[in-house]
Image (tube, helix red, strand yellow):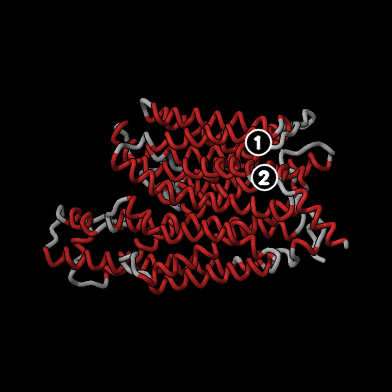
Amino acid sequence: MSNAVAHAQSTAERRSWGPMVGLFLAQVLMSFNVAALPISLGGMVQDFGVPPTVASSTIVMYGVAVAALVMTGAKLGQRVGWVAIFRVVVVVFAVSSLMMIFSPSVGWAIGGQVLAGAAAAIIVPALVALIAENYKGEQQATAVGSLGSARAFSGMSAFLIGGTLGTLVGWRPIFMITLAIAAAVFILSFTLRSDRGDPSVKIDLLASGLIGAAIVLLTLGFNNLNGWGILFAKDAAPFSLLGFSPAPVFVVLGVILGQLFFVRTRQRKAQGRVPLVDLDVLRHPTERAAVYAMFVIVAMEAAVNFTVPTYIQVVQGRTPFDTSLAMMPFNLTVFITATLIVRFYRRFPPRTIALFAFGLTTAALLWLAFVVTNNWETFPTIIGLIAFGVGQGALVTLVFNVLVTAAPKELAGDVGSIRGTTQNLASAVGTAVMGALLVTTLSFGVTQAVEERPELPASLAEQVDLSNVNFVSNDDLRAILDDTTATPAQVESAVALNEEQRLRTLKLGFLILAGISAIAALPASRLPRYRPEEIPDGSPEAP
């Protein structure tokens, strides 16, 4: 009888999915904007007459703004009220789209992305808080899962639509799509359940400054490990510290400021004052394990999203549209899995799903390390990307759902801010570390291989800067060697060596990612053992 009553109550509490459409589109808005930026770089370089490194500042500044401000944005949402501030920042995002469409210079485009990042810093925790406010139980799990699928859907559609528009019309019309999405989200926001802010919530400005500076330094440090130097400063570094690169120094300073932030946060909590983020959402091992797992998942995804497009566009010299087609199996699989994985929550505990998913990603990466070739369209490679996408889609949704369901509704904004900080920092770390690792490995491999090839004398090697080896296409390498004394036979030998070492480096990169995926089973083993219906709502403990 009690089960029947509970079922009746659950049915009565079910809400329309109309409000969730708006929240889904809000996630699409942010993800589409991020995915559209790399496609727009070529057009911005041509329109504004700036180097690619300057145009790519739009990407960096967006990520920095989100990661640095998301915790402050969460607390601001609690103070003002989530629905009210959600509508305001959606309008701000629309303004950023207008700045991209009509920008007369690259400075306006960079400013537009700073504005978009600041708006996203509030949208990210708002999505979690508004889902917790509008949906319960199984509907909440489904709603959380849809955010993961929205990211994959946006990346896939941005490459296809953006690539087509960028080729046929230009880069500016791409942001007309984000403008239209922002308008739709604003209209649909009026279907959301209204809430009231709490004016008594205080924002700890010192903690905000500490975490903001920490994130900026960590992001800049990791993003520039390759360009500025992993240890010793390269020519591209803005300055050097006794000959050392500022990139690792930024990382160390970022870690120190991050630790000071945690000290400050615990002090305010002990004093009975409201901290910038309530660390109670991480007080249990299961919740900390979910954050660690989320960091690994997003970092791996960023590493793959960096490696594959770089290889296809730079090495093979193909277009962004070709890249989107090559990544379609992965993105489509992540989208479908992130949507459907919630159906397994009542049959298997989070720990079981996570261990299986990490096992699948490990096996997929090992498979790719052995089967990948210079042609991404081979059937074995596609199978590997699909298997990795299944594990990735399941994990992104699962660990986020563990955090949301374990925390009380009033802490949903704090969960959202931790999610935003973790994802943006992990994305920067995954991309930068993978880039630095691959380039360093390639440089070492090429140097060693040249020494072992008598047909490539030292006099020829001295004419090519082997200390700055990077991924280049065969045509670009031939162009470089045309300016040396290399004979046609030596050119072909160098091209063959380059192909061999590129592929060897790529395989090694997948092997390293497989090792990281396997190690991630440690935090995954600490995820909850219970099924959702076996414990009271919000309880973090297994029975």
Q: Quadrant of residue 528?
A: bottom right
Image quadrant in which the C terminus is located:
bottom right
Q: Which residue is mark 2?
A: 16
Q: What amino acid is labelled 2 in the image?
A: Ser
Q: Which residue is mark 1?
A: 191
Q: Is mark 2 in CB contact (under 8 Å) with mark 1?
A: yes
Q: Quadrant of residue 20?
A: top right
Residue 533, compared with residue 215, is above or below; it is below
Using the rendered image of the protein, determine whether residue 232 is visible from the camera's viewpoint. no
Q: Residue furthest right?
A: 1
Q: Residue at x 33, y 57 (%)?
A: 312
Q: Is residue 91 left or right of residue 160?
A: right
* Nearer to me, 107 or 263: 107
Using the rendered image of the protein, determine whether residue 475 is visible from the camera's viewpoint. yes
* Nearer to me, 154 or 371: 154
Residue 121, compared with residue 337, is above or below; it is above
Give the numbered dot on residue 311. Answer: none
Distance from disc 2 to disc 1, alpha carbons, whole Å, reads 10 Å
The local secondary structure at tag 2 comes to loop
For label 2, the crowd category at 10 Å Cα-Cα, with few meaning under 14, some 14 to 19 and many 20 or more, is few
Q: What amino acid is labelled 1 in the image?
A: Thr
**Residue 158 x, y percent position in the rendering:** 42, 46
For label 1, the crowd category at 10 Å Cα-Cα, with few meaning under 14, some 14 to 19 and many 20 or more, is some
